[in-house]
Amino acid sequence: MSHDTDTAGRTVDHSDTPADRRFVIGRDVGTAASWFRILYGLIAVASLWYRIDKALDGGELVMMVVWFAVIAAVYTAVIWFFGRIDRFQGVSPWIPSALLQLPMMLYPMGIGSAPMHQALAVYTTLGVLLCGVARYGGLEVAALPMLLLGRRTVLYSPFNAIDITEQAFRQERTRGVMWVTSLALTVFVLIEYWWVGLLLSVPPAKDLLGESIRLPGYWVLLLLVPVVWFAALAARGRDRYRTVPIGQRWPGLAALVLLALVPMLGNRQVPDALWGIIMFVGLVVGLVTLVRLPFRKASNRREVGVAH
């Protein structure tokens, strides 16, 4: 894991570079995205409270606490260990993001005990809250270790979609009717399709609000309005953005991210589907890196030979 802040596509430790004020996806969090995480995390805590109360008895609850401590210790040790190995500097953040998220697949795959599954859920939920409170934009399972180790390493998270969207709105200087309309529609769709399903898993909230607040999936198409608007902004400013790193081209990034979210939000599969995408992309990037490694070593040997 690298401490290089020159490229947003590399793993970055913000604590080593206090002078760097450039927003980096997977490391930094804006105000709105921070509160989005916190509120989502609080809803998730309420949902977990009722689920755990029904699923576990007293002895299993103790085992859940033990499993939580084990999970936290293992993640902290792994992140500390790999952070000290020079060989991992410059590795794409996609790779550690995928590897760190993979153990969470034990839950949906049904591997392990109920206390372990609930401990994984609690650990992830705590990570969402910590990311919001500490304004860390990385992967949720790494939030507690990063806090304990004093690091802010770049790791990708489903909530980076919110980070990108917020930055795109913040960076746009012309705040006219389309800005307001796009912002309102984006907030409405994200709350409805990111929060409501989880909120209705909390019995008191379901009794109070009822199923009527769960809108049909086609309402997510309202998100196409900000998608088109951001795409138009990106096209209009393409000459200006040519000299800007890809990770800072906010209108284009927001258009792509929101467009990709449409089917997932419509099926209420966020953030789960996004965690899956992170794992898939990370594994692909890892395989490509392994395949290219022998060629890179051969190229380095040739360069050394030429130098001599």
Image: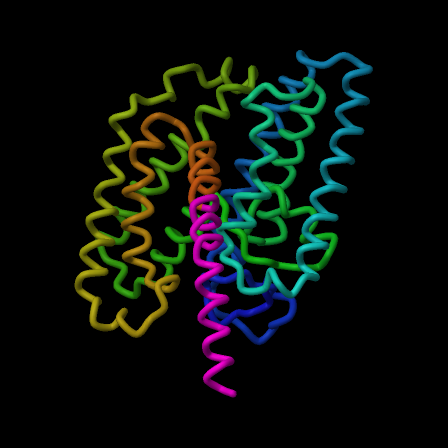
Q: Residue at x 46, y 84 (%)?
A: 306
**x, y (%) of residue 34?**
53, 49
Asked if the magenta segment contains residue 285, the reply would be yes
Image position, residue 167 (x, y; %): 39, 58
Which quarter of the figure has residue 192? Answer: top left
Place residue 118 in its image quadrant.
top right
Tell me if residue 300 comes above or below residue 293 in the rendering.
below
Question: Going 50% across and 45% down the picture, which residue do you hit?
Answer: 157
Q: Which residues are magenta?
A: 282-308
Q: Indicate left or right for 59 with 223 as reference.
A: right
Q: Split into 4 quadrants, where in the image is the N terminus?
A: bottom right
Specify the color scheme. Answer: rainbow
Per the image, is 273 magenta?
Answer: no
Q: Looking at the picture, does residue 43 appear above or below residue 52?
A: below
Residue nearest the observer in this picture, 256 or 178? 256
Tell me the chief SS of the magenta region. Answer: helix
- On the image, the x and y values in percent for residue 9 come to 45, 61
Give 143 or 74, whichever is nearer the viewer.
Answer: 74
